Image (cartoon, grey):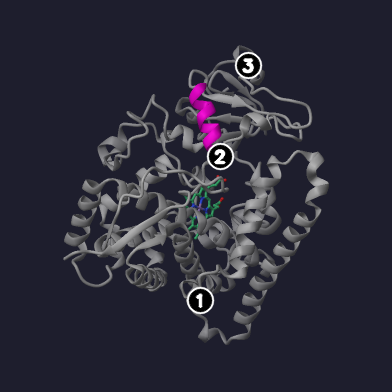
Amino acid sequence: MADGTTTSALRPLSDIPILPKLPIIGSLPWLYHPEGFMPRMLELIEQHRDVGALRVERPDGIIPIFVGNVSLAEDLVDENRFEKVLDGPLVHIRDFAGDGLFTAHSDEDNWHKANRILAPGFSTASLERYYPAMTETLERLLEHWLRANGPVDVVPDMTKLTLDTISLAGFDHRFDSFESTELHPFLQAIARTLQESIDVLQRPLFVEPLFRKHRARYQRDIESLFCLVDDVIRERKRLPEEKWPRDFLSLMLTVPDPKSGEKLSDKNIRYQILTFLVAGHETTAGLLSFAFHALARDRELFLRVRREVDEAVGRQGMPTMKQVLELDLVRRVLHESLRLWPTVPAVTRAAKEDTSMGPYVAPKGRPFGLLLNAIHRDPAVWKEPTRFDPDRFLPEAVKARPAAAYKPFGIGKRACTGKHFALIEASLCLAMVVREMDFEDPGPLRLTPTISPKPKGFRLRVRRRAA
Ligand code: MNH
């Protein structure tokens, strides 16, 4: 044991409270919440803060354990003893994201290989190359909102922004989403397959026959995703190399693994592209939507942010990437949004060898769902946890808390590859919208029950900034 205690002194996992359950449907009736599964889990953990963990029974009889207190999380984030495992929706997302970075197993060769090839391309320094894709796409959003000069639908517009940005930076493709009201069929297929990966977990097995057509469409959607991406790869290879744009696709096709000297296979590249699309758009779109909601409700904070932007960037033109990186308050607003509404609300960890989690045994391989939304509101660490206060992310305050208290980008070697990309893209958007526009208070926040939570029915009245 890492801490010298013996396994026999530890409590069995069956000591963790369990929700009521019924045959065939498990704990389903107790898990319903109009805003989705994750807000419900948060509510339940808050009722069990004394323990900080809860077991529920899935319709298939599997009993996941959810953990939501920082003290327990401190064990789960220990990279020496725990690692990411695939569980819940990730098992299904693997149907279309394959052995791409996000859904690869921690010991899979292709994870190590792709991580060595791709991670350097996402460092802050490398991101200069993709920054023009961010400003170009943001111009479209700003035009759209300035023209609207009235109510705008924030979530779909943020989705268009982040999708167009990642597609342009990732594989030089322009979806031009702001030119139509409908989302591109490819993007709709991504949204449907993603949602199915979580919906399937909440259906009792006996209703499955009623979902045969639905499952057939899921399979067709996946085929169509593969088709489009494989086409993009084939097209690229047909171009002479000196004409290749400097995007992630070219990087993947040309840069060999520094260790083995091998390049990624075309099939793996397909999975990586789908991974960027899947992991990299809803999450950032949700983050921006929540941040705008918070600013629209707090005029004083809004004006503080605007002052920062005016001073650092000026009143004209797009900022440079360096200027964006210097927008401290903007960055703190984004972190505070991710604290209250982490757009990936949970990750899964399991012990590499038998060990302990808090007072409990943690048998090798047994998955624990770590509820990020719950640790981010643990009152043992966060004072007045529901209050929106970006100054919680001032350097002194960050140093004073355990690192396990805030993990919106995941943990250790399996943490988010796109973190800097997302934060630069989101900072740029937040800064420019606040500089150019004023908002009206949209009223209280509700969440959608989607795989990545978003503000529900969030319309914002925007108007051009009065000088
Ligand atoms: Mn992202 C992994 C959150 C934006 C690409 N991301 C993760 C994980 C979290 C996460 C949490 C870890 C999941 C797990 O442990 O199972 N990601 C975010 C958030 C945002 C985000 C909150 C935006 C805000 N992510 C992005 C963007 C990209 C991206 C943008 C790509 C351009 N993320 C990834 C990849 C992984 C990942 C790739 C998988 C990393 C790995 O396991 O090696």
**What element does badge 1 sit on?**
loop
Quadrant showing the C terminus: bottom left
Q: Nearer the viewer, residue 382 or 35?
A: 35
Sort mark 3 into few (<14), some (14-19) or many (20+) by Cα contacts within 10 Å: few
Nearest-to-viewer mark from 3 and 1: 1
Quarter of the image with the N terminus in it: top right
Circle 3 residue: 15
Secondary structure character of the magenta stretch overall: helix
Residue at disc 2, secondary structure:
loop
Specify which label sits upstream in the sequence, 3 or 1: 3
Disc 2 and disc 3: Cα gap in Å? 29 Å
Q: Say which residue appears at 76% left-offset and 31% top-offset.
A: 61
Q: Residue at x 53, y 75 (%)?
A: 173
User: Disc 1 designates what residue?
Assistant: 174
Reply yes or no: does residue 40 show up in magenta.
yes
Query: Which sits in the foreground, 49 or 397?
Result: 49
Q: Which residue is mark 2?
A: 34
Residue 222: image quadrant is: bottom right
What is the three-letter code of the residue carrying label 2?
Pro
User: Which of the 4 image quarters holds residue 464?
Assistant: bottom left
Q: Position of residue 398 (x, y in %)?
A: 31, 37
Mark 1 Cα-neighbour bin, 10 Å: few <14, some 14–19, many ≥20: some
**For marks 2 and 1 on the same chain, the one whose residue lies earlier in the sequence:** 2
Residue 392 location (% of width, % of height): 30, 38
Say what amino acid the circle numbered 1 marks.
Arg
Q: Which residues fall within the magenta stretch? A: 38-48
